[in-house]
Amino acid sequence: MRAEWLKIWEIDSLRDYCSLALRQPPAQKEKVVNIKQGRTATAANVDSPTKYVRMTFIAEYLRWLAEVLAKASTKAQKVEIDSMYKTIKSHRPNKKGRSNTSREDKGLDSEVLQEVMDVSKPGHEKNPYSGYSLQVRNAAIIALLHYLGIRRGELLNLRVDDIDFVANELRIVRRADSSVDSRVYQPLVKTEERTLPISDRLAEILSEYVTRIRSEFPRARKHPYLFVTHKQGPYQGEPLSNSGFGKLMSAMQHVAENFSHIHAHAFRHSWNYSFSKALDESTGDHSPEKEEKMRSYLMGWKETSGTAATYNRRHTKEKAKEAILGYQRDIGQVRGVSDE
């Protein structure tokens, strides 16, 4: 027995699959069908409680199966089995009323984030990816996650024509069940469609990949998806799969001990924290309501969802800490009590 456990990207795929309805939605009886409703029904998802139960049972079953197959397992294998079990359970959606207090801490520290950006540059001595073309592709992927905070599904769903290199803009588009997508598990855009501005530097990174790297793969000319598989074989030039993206993240996680928390969603949390800091330092007048609207649009959330507040919790906690310490210093000075 090889004793290999589910990797993080495989658990991500499992989570996405558990979101899907196993039965086709019933046919609409109404003669007039809303276009939005019709589109949603095509990619119907189950509710959070159902997804939670599915992943719970799968986690329990896979732990049991692994323990049965590895009867003479070592202590290290038992730790790995338990780690896989806990990781699957951690990917379950939050139950209604469950604590969300740890979500704000899922971002990357600024020092780690800067190191990741440095290491991912083509030619860096610690770059874990072999070959210049692969390094350019992966640098472009990490740059998109860092600069825009987009989700994994949004990134894998990007097409070349979604980028306007003249206007320096990038579109996030929902495309359920695309006929030109050859991937078994097509990436889904779960957020709202939107157009995002991109910096000159990000445009340069993407342009280099499209014109100098991607164009060299014959199969890439037969589909519009931005990122493609570079590995030699029958899938070379085909759209990058979820597992391929996971291997990219996994390779970066092993560069250094403090890189272990690197994954797509960590960049999203880090983006929100950096966005809050940038607004603090800007000279513009940004009310909490205006900030929430901007954040919701850029992240693709509905303004009424409340998700913006969740992702801003880390920054809010820091501001609250500053406020309460300032208050304590003030009353200490009034009463003649020093912190020293």
Image (tube, rainbow, N blue to C red):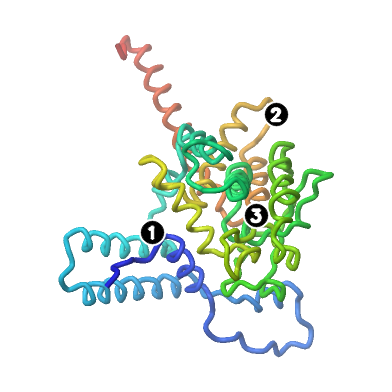
| Element carrying mark 3 | loop
Q: Residue at x 33, y 12 (%)?
A: 335
| Element carrying mark 2 | loop
Label 2: which residue?
A: 284
Q: Residue at x 47, y 73 (%)?
A: 18
Nearer-N-terminus badge (1/3): 1
Q: Residue at x 64, y 42 (%)?
A: 289
Image spot of residue 227 (x, y percent): 65, 57
Image spot of residue 167 (x, y percent): 83, 44
Mark 2 neighbour density, 10 Å: few (under 14) some (14–19) many (20 or more)? few
Residue mark closest to the camera, 1 vs 3: 3
Q: Are marks 2 and 3 in contact (CB under 8 Å)?
A: no
The residues tagged by marks 1 and 3 sit, at their Cα atoms, a distance apart of: 24 Å
On screen, residue 310 above or below 110:
below
Q: Is residue 316 in sight in this rendering? A: no
Q: Is residue 44 in sight in this rendering? A: yes
Label 3: which residue?
A: 300
Label 1: which residue?
A: 98
| Element carrying mark 1 | loop
Relative placement, left or right, of 241 versus 208 is: left
Nearer-N-terminus badge (2/1): 1
Amino acid on which disc 1 is placed: Arg
The residues tagged by marks 2 and 1 sit, at their Cα atoms, a distance apart of: 36 Å
Q: Nearer the viewer, residue 161 or 47?
A: 161
Amino acid on which disc 2 is placed: Gly
Residue 158, image quadrant = bottom right
Residue 330, image quadrant = top left
Q: Residue at x 53, y 76 (%)?
A: 20
